C-alpha cells in the first residue's frame, strides 16, 4: 500500500460535507498521492465511489469498521 | 447516395467495397467521436432557486456544492423568495411548520422515547401561539447541528469556493424593495429570465427548486 500523503477526518459530518472536504483536500495534492478519508456517515460509502468515478481519481479502498468508514483515494 | 460519393469514400478509406460497408464505417466512427466528445465534456447543471425558508435553502446548496465537487459547472438563478438566500446574513432564515404537514416535529433533546415522538400540533395552535416559528426554527437548527449537517452559510461558502455561479433576479430586488447592498458581493450578475434561460438550455441537468 502506498504511503498516505494526507488525511481528512470527516467524522460526525453529514452529506455533502465529507465529499466537499475530500474535494478540498485532493485539490492541493500531487497526482499519484494517496488521501485517507475517515467518515461516520453511512451515505458517504456510495457517495465516495461516485465522487471517484466522476472525478477520475482511484478509490483504492473503502473499509467499514463499526460505525467508521475509511477510504483511500489516489489522485489522478 | 451518389456514385461519385461512394467512389470518393472508397478512395479515402481502404477496405470499403460497398455502400453498406461505408455506412457501417460511418456509424462506427460517428459513435467513437460522439463518445469521445461526451467523455471530454464537463457536465453542467443549472437550478432555479425560488424558496427562501431554512428547509428549502438546503436542496439547492447541497446539490450545487456536490456537483461542483464532482467537477461540474454549476449556475444558480435566485428569484422571488430564493433571492433571500443571497443576503449577507442568512442566519435569520426560518422554518414554518404551519401548513407544512410533511415536516416532522421532534424534540432534539431528552431520552430516546421522547425524541421519537412526532408531535402532531394542530394548525390552529401553530398559527396562534406567538413565536411558534422561532421555536420550530431553533429546534430544527439544533437538530441539524447535532446531526453534523452543515449550516446554510457553510454550504453557500463551499459553493462559492468551488466557483458555483450565483445569478440574481433583477426584478425581484425591485419587487420586494430590497437594495443591492443587502446581498453578498459574490453575486455574478443581476439579470432577468431571458438571460438565464440560455444557460439552462445548455445544461445537462436543469432543476427548479
Image (spheres, rainbow, N blue to C red):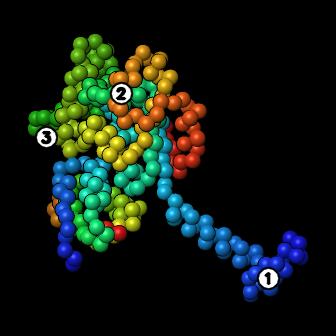
Mark 1 lies on residue:
B10
Image mark 1: chain: B
Query: Of the residues under marks 3 and 2, which one precedes in the sequence?
Result: 3
| Residue A72 marker | none
Is the C terminus of chain B in the top left, top right, bottom left or bottom right quadrant? Answer: top left
Single out the mark in the foreground, 3 or 2: 2
Q: Residue pushed farthest left?
A: B111
Q: Secondary structure at mark 3?
A: helix
Gap between marks 3 and 2 measured at Cα:
41 Å
Image mark 3: chain: B
Mark 3 lies on residue:
B112
Q: Could you tell me residue B42's position as x and y percent?
A: 48, 57
Mark 2 lies on residue:
B183
Q: Is B139 placed left or right of B64 in the picture?
A: left
| Residue A41 in sight here | yes
Kindly indicate the quadrant of the structure image that contains residue A29. Answer: bottom left
Q: Secondary structure at mark 2?
A: loop
- Residue at the image position 35 percent from the left and 48 percent from the top: B162
Q: Secondary structure at mark 1?
A: helix
Amino acid at each position: 500500500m502506498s504511503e498516505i500523503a494526507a488525511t481528512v477526518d470527516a467524522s460526525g459530518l453529514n452529506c455533502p460535507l465529507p465529499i466537499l472536504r475530500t474535494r478540498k483536500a485532493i485539490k492541493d495534492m500531487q497526482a499519484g498521492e494517496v488521501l485517507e478519508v475517515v467518515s461516520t456517515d453511512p451515505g458517504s460509502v456510495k457517495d465516495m465511489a461516485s465522487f471517484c468515478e466522476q472525478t477520475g481519481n482511484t478509490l483504492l479502498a473503502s473499509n467499514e469498521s463499526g460505525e467508521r468508514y475509511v477510504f483511500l483515494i489516489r489522485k489522478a | 447516395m451518389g456514385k461519385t460519393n461512394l467512389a470518393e469514400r472508397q478512395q479515402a478509406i481502404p477496405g470499403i467495397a460497398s455502400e453498406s460497408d461505408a455506412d457501417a464505417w460511418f456509424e462506427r466512427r460517428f459513435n467513437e467521436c460522439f463518445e469521445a466528445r461526451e467523455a471530454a465534456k464537463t457536465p453542467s447543471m443549472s437550478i432555479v432557486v425560488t424558496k427562501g425558508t431554512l428547509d428549502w435553502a438546503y436542496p439547492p446548496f447541497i446539490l450545487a456544492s456536490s456537483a461542483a465537487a464532482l467537477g461540474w459547472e454549476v449556475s444558480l438563478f435566485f428569484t422571488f423568495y430564493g433571492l433571500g438566500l443571497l443576503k449577507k446574513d442568512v442566519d435569520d432564515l426560518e422554518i414554518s411548520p404551519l401548513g407544512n404537514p410533511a415536516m416532522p416535529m421532534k424534540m432534539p433533546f431528552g431520552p430516546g422515547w421522547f425524541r421519537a415522538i412526532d408531535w402532531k400540533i394542530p394548525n390552529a395552535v401553530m398559527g396562534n401561539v406567538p413565536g411558534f416559528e422561532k421555536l420550530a426554527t431553533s429546534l430544527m437548527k439544533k437538530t441539524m447541528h447535532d446531526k453534523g449537517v452543515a449550516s446554510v452559510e457553510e454550504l453557500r461558502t463551499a459553493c462559492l469556493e468551488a466557483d458555483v455561479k450565483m445569478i440574481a433576479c433583477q426584478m425581484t430586488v425591485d419587487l420586494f424593495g430590497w437594495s443591492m447592498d443587502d446581498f453578498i458581493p459574490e453575486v455574478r450578475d443581476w439579470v432577468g429570465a431571458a438571460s438565464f434561460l440560455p444557460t439552462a438550455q445548455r445544461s445537462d441537468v436543469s432543476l427548479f427548486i
